[in-house]
Image (cartoon, helix red, strand yellow):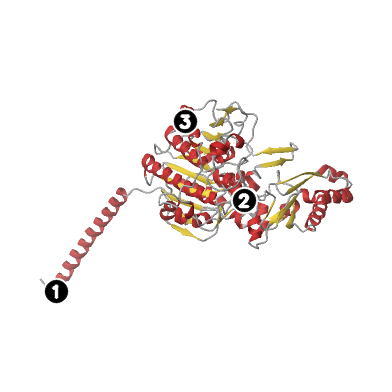
Amino acid sequence: MNTRKCVVLFLLMFFGLNSLLVQAQKKSKNKSKADTKIEAPFESPKLVVGIIVDQMRFDYLNRFWNQYGDGGFKRMVNEGFNCKNNFFNYVPTYTAPGHASVYTGTTPSNHGIIGNNWYDKELDKEVYCVSDDSYASVGTTSDAGQMSPFRNNVTTMTDQLRLHTQMQGKVIAVALKDRGAVLPGGHTANAAYWFHGKDEGKWITSTFYMNELPKWVVDFNAADKAESYKKPWTTLKNSNTYTASGTDANAYEGLFKGEVNSAFPHDVPALWDANGQYDLIKATPYGNNLTTDFALAALEGENLGSDAITDFLAISYSSTDYVGHMYGVNSKEVEDTYIRLDADLERLFNTLDAKVGKGAYTVFLTSDHAAVDVPAYLADQKIPAGYFKTSQIKEKFNDYLKYSFGTTDIVKNISNDQIFLDHKIVKNLDLGLEEVEKQIARELMSYGIYDRVYTGVQMWENNYTSGVSYVLQNGYNHQRSGDILMVMKPNVIGYNKTGSTHGSAYSYDTHAPLLFFGKGIKKGETLNRTEIPDIAPTISALLGIEYPNGTSGNPIVEVLE
């Protein structure tokens, strides 16, 4: 065979083999595609657990770190994602706006929950955020159950889950406070339950959700679990180890009726009748214990997380707020309350591992607001701080109104650091609203007690993007808010001289923890700024559901796998 024929034969063999190889590769790829399952662009945990810790400052994570066990806060930090630079982006920083903002993914400017209570301009009276006398109480003969979420103008992530699953995914919300359960549950919750103390000590609800309590709730109430917490409040650990707090008895802490000093132990049985009976439990860590007991009963009674359709359990721990208000940020009582809450979280997570499955549920934890150090304590440390009451300027301010406008009736209401004007009187006086607002704002600034004062017209006409004006505008609702907005100086509060409070735009009230862990959550942390309205779109993106309809936040992309 000559050389030319050999070359031709070789080329035919080569290209023939190569063709066979290409065909084999194509078949292999096609088979691989057929065998590969295309993953959904979202995670479907069996259960989402949303936890709000009332009045929790971000620094409590670090301050009490060495006192925590491995299965509560530390587990969330070590196994999950920690947003270290998380802030409320509105004022006022109160319980109701906080719970609403976490679950709606927006601010009071949209959802309309502008306070715990506020002056209703249409009704010309003060209203409570979730009160609704068109519904009746369930589980009590008192009016404590006449509640609904109707004042929330938008949907929640819990609403969107219910809609997405054709109402098959269950939503159960639990808190000592009615507003801490009603607002997270949203408009479509299967149930929201809260604790009615006084002489009853029962978990109750509203006919908005149901006409009678389910058997598991009746059984829980009949078991007198609340009664078991009628016991002295002593420290869980040796009080000498509570070095992250101030002295045990001091002038900055409040007293229960009947106490002579604020030191441990607190004799709950002896203080019972003088301090509201079962309501006293709320102001001790036992209120959080009771909340966990009831949440676990709900998990079991409602079979949450038992199938592939995602359920939602919303838990709000309220006792941290009651204790903070009574004893203040720097108290051993607050430290003990968080040590005990950490143990409750471990108990909750261990039960979820056993009943739902480790890695089969997703949890987030945040707060509804933080709190200021007791101003009297700060002042003693030579830090600028103080107290203020509207009554201090009332006479001077009324004289100004009479001199400038001929009547004090031009002001209809002063509440939540806002002034509501009577627009009819302004018009009858042939005055412009903008000029009246400016005049009053200038007058208030001359008193030397406010850091700044803004007008409603400023909130209407400007688009603020940073600073105090930004958070004020996010808290300003065009239908419900006032005409003049007053901002106190840092560490100045209108409150008792003992205990802590909250409500301002400053970091001590707005810097809150935000932890995620479980199914679909990365392990890590970020110092990038996140804001409270980012939580709902993050969880919604994880679940692959539509965002709440008023959402102004954004998903935190670093959190999600």
Callouts 2 and 3 close, C-beta under 8 Å: no
Figure quadrant of residue 255:
top right
Give residue 249's position: percent from left, percent from top.
58, 51
Instruction: Count neighbours of disc 2 (C-alpha within 10 A) and say few if under 14, some if 14 to 19, many if 20 or more.
Output: many
The circle drawn on residue 306 is none
CA–CA distance in space, label 2 to label 1: 99 Å
Q: Please, is residue 202 above or below residue 438 in the view?
A: above
Residue at x 32% of width, y 51% of height: 33
- Residue type at mark 3: give it: Phe
- Is any atom of residue 464 visible in this view? no
Q: Nearer the viewer, residue 273 or 164?
A: 273
Residue that mark 1 sits on: 3
Say which element carries label 3: helix
Give residue 280's position: percent from left, percent from top.
57, 38
Q: Earlier in the sequence, mark 2 or mark 3?
A: 3
The mark total stands at 3
Give residue 104's position: percent from left, percent from top.
57, 45
Q: Nearer the viewer, mark 2 or mark 1?
A: 2
Residue that mark 2 sits on: 500
Callouts 3 and 1 close, C-beta under 8 Å: no
